[in-house]
Image (cartoon, rainbow, N blue to C red):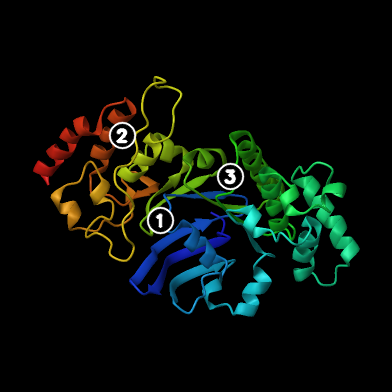
Amino acid sequence: MPDPLLEVKDLKVTFETADGVVKAVDGISYKVESGKALGIVGESGSGKSVSSLTVMGLSRFTNAEVEGEILFEGRDLLKASDEDMRKIRGNEIAMIFQDPLSSLHPYYKVGKQLVEAIRAHHPETSKQAARTRAIELLGMVDIPEPKRRIDNYPHEFSGGMRQRTMIAMALSNDPKLLIADEPTTALDVTVQAQILALIERLQHELNTAVVIITHDLGVIAETADDVAVMYAGRIVERAPTKKIFETPEHPYTWGLLRSIPRLDVPREAPLVPIPGRPPSLINPPSGCSFHPRCPYVLPRHKEIDPMLEPVPGEPDHSAACLLKSDVRKQIWSELREGKDPADVRAHVQLEEKTV
C-alpha cells in the first residue's frame, strides 16, 4: 500500500459558544491516496465541512480547539504556522466552496481573480503569463470562448459556469489535494453530471487526490472510491463505495440510501425519510448518537456508545453499530426487498433475547 497523501488521525474540533461547547468533529480518522477520491457524506450539521475546513487551516478561531493530527505528506498541518498554511493553502491543497457566487468577488472580473490566485503563490509569474494560464484553465474546465469570457464579471456567468470557474481557480496551481464541498449544490441535474465528470477527468489527468463532501449519495456513487458516512461529528461507517451501496452496515446509511429516488420501484411509491432530525452537538444523546432516530434501537443502545469497528471478515469495511453484523445484513436484505422497518424489527427483538 502506498503512503497516503493525507491522513487524518482522531481529529476533534470544538467551539466555545454562549450556549455551551459544540463538538463539531468528535474523533474522526481517514486516509486519502494520490489519484483516489474519498466521499464524505451526511446531513447538514454532521461535521463534514468543519473537518475539511480544518484541513485547510480555516478553523483557527479564538473560540475553537483542535486536537488530533492532520498529516499531509507526513507533515502535521495542525502544527504548521499561519504563514506556512498560507503557502500550502491554494497551492498544494485547494478547496471548491459550496456557493460559487459568494466565493467569487462581485467587484472584480473573473480573469483578475484567477490571475491573483496564480500570482499569490508564484509572484515571479508576469501578469501576461498568468492571464494566459487563466485562459488555459477556463478552457480546461469547458468554459466556452475563454479568451472573451475571462473579462466577464461573476454575475455574467451561469451557475454552472461559476462552479467551473471555482474549479479552475482551485486547479490553478496544480494542487496535490482537492477538497470539493458540495460542488453540485443548486445546479440542475445535467450541469451536475458535467461538473462531476469534469472533477473525475481532472483527477485522473493530474493524479490529484480528491475529497468530495456532500449529502447526496448519488454524487458519491459517480465520483468516490471510498466513502465515510458522518453523523453527529463522527464517522459511523466507512467502506469502498461499492460496499456502501450493496451491503451497508449502519442504520443511518440505510436511511440515506432509502431516501434516494429509485427506478426499480413503482412510480407512486413514496420516499422514505429518516425520522426526526440530527441531534444537538452541544447536548448529544447518551449511548449511540443515532438511537433517537433508529427504528431498530434496543435499550442497551441508549447506554453504550459504539466504536467504529471492522465488519467481521471485511477489514476494509467498518461500522459503529451495536447490532450484530449478521442481523444487520438480514435487515438490509429485507429493506431492499421493500419491507417496512417495523416488520423487520423481529430480527432485532430476537437478538435482544440472545444478548
Q: CA distance from mark 2 to mark 1?
A: 23 Å
Is there any visible trace of residue 177 in the rendered image?
no
Q: Residue at x 58, y 77 (%)?
A: 80
Q: Which residue is at the front of the view, 87 or 269?
A: 269
> Left or right of 27: which side holds 137?
right
Residue beneath disc 1? 46
The amino acid beneath tag 1 is Ser
Q: Residue at x 48, y 62 (%)?
A: 51
Q: Residue at x 22, y 58 (%)?
A: 287
Q: CA distance from mark 3 to mark 2?
A: 29 Å
Q: Residue at x 53, y 44 (%)?
A: 225
The amino acid beneath tag 2 is Trp
Q: Secondary structure at mark 2?
A: helix
The amino acid beneath tag 3 is Thr
Vertical placement of 172 versus 148: above or below? below
Vertical placement of 54 versus 300: above or below? below
Q: Which residue is at the front of the view, 163 or 218?
A: 163
Residue beneath disc 2? 332
**Residue 4 numbered tag:** none
